[in-house]
Each structure stands twice: as structure tokens, then as C-alpha cells.
Amino acid sequence: MNTVQKEKLSSKKYKKEFITAFNGDDSGNLTPRQTPGMLYSKAIPTPVEKVTLLAWSEELAAQLGIEKPTDQKEIDVLGGKHIADTMYPYAACYAGHQFGNWAGQLGDGRAITLGEWETETSKSWELQLKGAGPTPYSRRADGRAVLRSSVREYLMSEAMHYLGVPTTRALSLVTTGEPVLRDMFYNGNAAYEPGAIVMRTAPSFLRFGNFEMLAARKELDNLQQLVNWTIDHYYPHIQDEDKVLNWFKEIVDRTAKLMVEWMRVGFVHGVMNTDNMSILGLTIDYGPYSFVDDYDPDFTPNTTDLPGRRYAFSKQPSIAYWNLGCLAGALAPLFPDTKKLVEVLETYKQVYWTNYYGMMGKKLGLDQVSGEDVQLIKELEQMLTAIKPDMTIFFQLLIDLPLEMADAAAVEEHFNTALYSELNEDEKDQLYTFVLKYTARINANSCTREASQELMRRTNPRFVLRNYLLHQAIEELEQGKDELFTKLQAAIKEPYSDKYDEFFQTRPEWASQKAGCSMLSCSS
Ligand code: AMP
Ligand code: MG
């Protein structure tokens, strides 16, 4: 990796394939408006007071061949204050379904793509600033981002990468030297917070919503062109005559597998609107997300989602399917009838469940997953829902479970550090019953216990970036201290090791009701 030739952000020759291929509004006018016929609008970042580098993703930069900025001009690129000659900053126009309702045109309201960075291996990565100022899609909002939400996106997208979950990446985090006004809980208590900007990157930030918008506007030529372009650029292996259908099938597969990954690590996105669904099957748009601490299928971290819990932990896979239905609806005008499209959509469940049980089998250290094992997994889920242990810690303790357990009390003792409250007799019983069945099943494995434990260690993270840790790191940063922030940047890179066991504990009591630790809003 060290042999990659590094280039500077300010002197790189950026590609502009997206804006070259499609109609856009090149006026540079930032007034909020509808932009029919346009797939993007030019949007120059609004310069900020002072760009200060707070974090830089060394490994990602090395992979892309980007030289770490040292002088102020280079750092200014990361804050949208200096635009390289060959950049063409734009905001993409997309629509979407939000909380189940059609929301019409949305678009990048505070994200600006600067250009496409081509690596030595001819792969292209969009470089995008989040929080660099208003665009025509900002509506009544300011196009800015606060330090709190920027730290959350920066750290969590990188954490997901190291967990092995498909995701957009974050290259840098800068502060802007400008305060940003936010009403964190939409309750009339607006306050100034420090402003910040993340430079994030992905092969493409295209969402289901980009396709939905063109279908809704009946711009079928644009729709067909965007579909072809997306396949050519990001799915070049799909070349047969049923191209669009096979492409949709691959999106179905990728999305199903992404959901399996979220369920594996206990990630709850919080805002699974169709404008937050990546066409590449990546985790995208980090807002009011959370890991599951105490196991609860109904857990949602998003205050806005509380009435219906539409985006709760266990509902994510079915919401992804619903969202794929919206995408299918958008693609339907490209087909003579919807029969085949619906057939492909309907493969989602099978892909999801096959992969889900395969994944759960690995979490449990099973050599294979039979019909009986599926039953065991269902019993595990019921038991976890009843006793609500810490999800991450429970699975870690399961790895080292002695295969001979004397009685229910010994079992409870073994899982004690994962528990948030004392178990009643019935709960103790459920846990014990599960452990008896589980140990019998482990004894029936055809592989060694060590091999099974090794599989579990690879599948179950030991360190997850819990919201209370983020909250503490952000509070410290706001006071000018970066000790915890620095430590978390290191810890996220080794989620499967015990190196950061200082964080191996249940969410502390103080964090369970505290704003920003248990509940979050979209306000960022
Ligand atoms: P999100 O809930 O973050 O996915 O955002 C939904 C829509 O609101 C997107 O079009 C965003 O670009 C836009 N948006 C969110 N926050 C802001 C902001 N501070 N300024 C401008 N637009 C925003
Ligand atoms: Mg979004």
C-alpha cells in the first residue's frame, strides 16, 4: 500500500463523469427551488471562517493515494474554502419516501460533491463535503453540520468499515470556526454549537431516491440513462439482455446482505428513508443511529421515529424490502409489465433469511445450520428479548461458555456482566434452557471447539462504538480535549480484539436516559 503514488487534494485532476453525462443546472444559483429535468445543480461551498483539521483517515487516504494536507490551502479543501481547478462542486437532486410517505424532491441539502477522485487502479471515488453550506436543495435549512453530528458520521462510518460492513467512508473531519444554531430536540431550545465538515467518500452516493425522482417526474429518458450509467459504472459485469432486471436483482441481494450485517453487529440506522438507501448497498447517511445495547427488537434511537417505531432494530430487514419496492416502482416504467420485477423483488425474503440464519449460525459457532438450528436461533431471540442482556457482551460471553454448567445459577453467574437487571425465575429458566440446548448442539459440531470459538470471534464484535462513548468524546472535544476521541479512532480499527477492553462494559446507568446517549434526533 505504501508504494501508491500520493497526490495532493488541490492539484489532482478530478474526473467529472456524472455531471458530464447528465443534465444539470449550471447557474450556481443557491436559492431553494425545484429543479425539474435536472439531476444535479452546481453549488459552490460557502467559505467558512477557519478550517482546522481534527481527524484524518490515514489508511483510507493511503488506499486512495491522497496526500495528507499540511499547509492551510490543502486543509481548506477539506472545508470547502479552497476549490481545486478541476473540481465541479454540485448537489445531487433526488426524492424519496420518508417514514413511509412520498416526500417529493429532497436532494443534497448539505452535501456537496466536489469531484471524482481516480485512483491508480482506475477506480473512482466521489469526494463529498457534508456541511459546506446551502445548495438549491437546502429548503429552509442552513446547509451546515455541527461538530456533534460530524464526529458521529466520521467515526461511525469508519467503525462500520472496520467491522466489515459495507459503508461509505470518511476521509477527514474539520471544524469551521463558525457557530451553527440547532434545536437539537425540536422543542424550542435552540443553541449554538460548533460547526464542522466531514469529507466523505464512496464510489457513488446515488440513492434509491435519485431513481424515484425521475420516475415521479416522468422523465423516462433521464431514468433510462441513469440506470444504464449506473450499471456501466458500478455494475460493469452485468451485460446480458435482461440487464436492468439483473441489476435490480443484485441491488436486492446487496441490500438483503447489508441488513444481515446490521443485524449481526446490532446496528440501528434510525432513518431508513428511501433517500438514505444506497444504490450500491452501502450504509449511508449516518444520523440518529445506535448500536443495540440491551437487546430489544423494538429499539429505535430516533426521537422522530418513536410514535411508530418504523425503523426499529428488528424491523430494518422488512423496511429494506419495502424500500426496494419503492425502487422497483421507480424502475417499472422501463418494463413492459411489472411481473418480472415483482418476481425479483420477491426473492428478497429468501436471500435475507438464508443469509440471516447462516450469519446467526456463525455468531453461535455452528458448523452448519439445519432446520433444528433455525429453531434454536428463534429460541435464542425469544430468550434475548425476555432477559435483555447487552447484545455485544452476551455473544462474547457465549464464546467462552463452559460446556458443562452445573445449574441455572451458574449460568446466570456466567452471563452476569451482560445483564442490565436481575433475572426473575422465569428468565433464569429461559436462559438455562437455552444454554442446555446450545451446549448440546456445540458438542455435536463436526469441527473442534477451538475452530467454533474462532468463528465466533470473527463474527461477534467485542468493541462497538456505543452512543454514550460518542457523547463523551463529543463533550470533551467541545471543551478542547481530544483524548477519548483519539482513543476511539484507534479502537474502531480493532473491533474483534480485546485490546480495548476498557470499553468492554454495559452502557452505564447515567447514559440510559440522557439526551444524545439513548435518544437522538435528525437535527444535525
Ligand atoms: P436526512 O434526514 O439527513 O437524510 O436529510 C433529509 C433531507 O434534508 C436531505 O435532503 C438533506 O440534505 C436535508 N437536510 C438535512 N439537514 C440539513 C441542513 N442542515 N441543511 C440543509 N439541508 C438539510
Ligand atoms: Mg439523507
Image (spheres, rainbow, N blue to C red):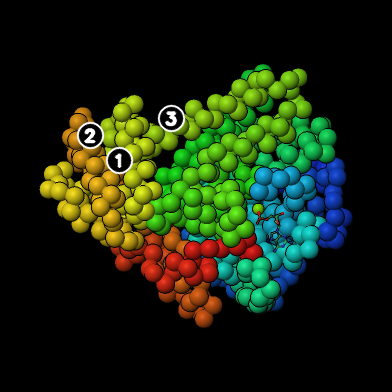
Please name the residue that numbered disc 1 is placed on.
364
- Secondary structure found at label 3: helix
- Residue at the image point whose x is 74% and y is 44% from the top: 102
Within 10 Å of the Cα at label 3, are there few (<14), some (14-19), or many (20+) other Cα atoms?
some
370 displayed left or right of 172:
left
Residue that mark 3 sits on: 354
Q: Closer to the camera, 303 or 120?
A: 303
- Return the x and y of residue 471 as percentages of the image width and height: 49, 69
Residue 139 in the image, given as x and y percentages of width and height: 79, 59
Q: Residues at badges 1 and 3 in contact (C-beta under 8 Å)?
A: no
- Left-right relation of 69 to 445: right
Residue at 58% x, 65% y is 149
Looking at the image, can residue 239 be seen?
Answer: no
Q: How many marks?
A: 3
Name the residue tied to disc 2: 441
Mark 3 vs mark 2, foreground winner is: 2
Q: Earlier in the sequence, mark 1 or mark 3?
A: 3
Quarter-wise, where is residue 199 in the image? Answer: bottom right
Residue 436 visible to an observer of this rendering: yes
User: Quick one: SS at disc 1?
Assistant: loop
SS at circle 2? helix
